[in-house]
Image (cartoon, rainbow, N blue to C red):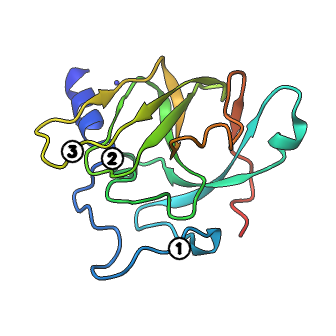
């Protein structure tokens, strides 16, 4: 994901037009799941990770912020100190892509896990915040074409069961409280 389109998407993968997602003067919410409230422009979606031989894991639905529209994918977690009580941010694309990620304005260390059109894990990358004074931020290209990506706090892949041979699904029913 034509050179111009890639540059636009990559440089804006985590950068909103207005990086302020909460009203000015509000303090960030606690890290409990009871504080989950999608920011404007985002929805939430249930997701599950399955690993062959671990049927219990596939039955455990988790909750992610959903970025499936261009503006939401561009904004990503820009300006957020944490995942706002969610397990991940899910990026869903309408067709397989090779768009990379950038960390301009994203102050937390993240890992992005990539899944192909069948939901099979194809690789992951650790992402480092881009310094505020940097003229350009690096782009992190995916290891191969993907359809879905999950951004998680660095170190959380194993907690979520994301490993080689894992598959990602989006069960019906939404997120539970």
Find the residue positioned furthest to the front.
155
Q: Residues within 10 Å of mark 3 (few under 14, many from 20)?
A: some
Answer above or below: position of 176 versus 156: below
Say which residue label 1 marks: 30
- Secondary element under disc 3, as helix, strand or loop, is loop
Per the image, the residue denoted by label 2 is 14
- Marks 1,3: beta carbons within 8 A: no
To which quarter of the image does residue 12 belong? Answer: top left
Q: Nearer the viewer, residue 75 or 118?
A: 75
Q: Quadrant of the C terminus?
A: bottom right
Per the image, label 1 sits on a secondary structure element best described as loop
Check disc 2: other Cα within 10 Å, few if <14, some if 14-19, many if 20+: many
The residue labelled by disc 3 is: 131
- Eye-nearest disc, 2 or 3: 3
**Image coordinates for residue 69, horizontal then vertical, percent:** 42, 48
Foreground of the two, 158 or 17: 158
Q: Quadrant of residue 78?
A: bottom left
The answer for how far apart the CA atoms under marks 2 and 3 are is 14 Å
Q: Position of residue 16 (x, y in %)?
A: 27, 55
């Amino acid at each position: 994901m034509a050179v111009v389109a890639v540059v636009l998407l990559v440089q804006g993968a985590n950068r909103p037009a207005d990086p302020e997602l909460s009203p000015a003067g509000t303090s960030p919410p606690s890290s409990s799941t009871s504080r989950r409230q999608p920011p404007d422009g985002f929805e939430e979606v249930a997701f599950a990770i399955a690993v062959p031989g671990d049927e219990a894991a596939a039955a455990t639905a988790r909750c992610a912020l959903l970025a499936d529209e261009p503006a939401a994918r561009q904004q990503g977690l820009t300006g957020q100190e944490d995942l706002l009580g969610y397990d991940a941010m899910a990026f869903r694309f309408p067709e397989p892509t090779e768009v990379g990620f950038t960390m301009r304005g994203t102050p937390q260390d993240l890992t992005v896990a990539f899944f192909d059109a069948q939901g099979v894990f194809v690789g992951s990358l650790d992402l480092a915040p881009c310094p505020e004074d940097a003229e350009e931020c690096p782009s992190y290209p995916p290891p191969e074409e993907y359809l879905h990506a999950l951004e998680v706090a660095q170190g959380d892949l194993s907690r979520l069961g994301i490993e080689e041979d894992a598959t990602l699904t989006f069960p019906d029913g939404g997120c539970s409280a």
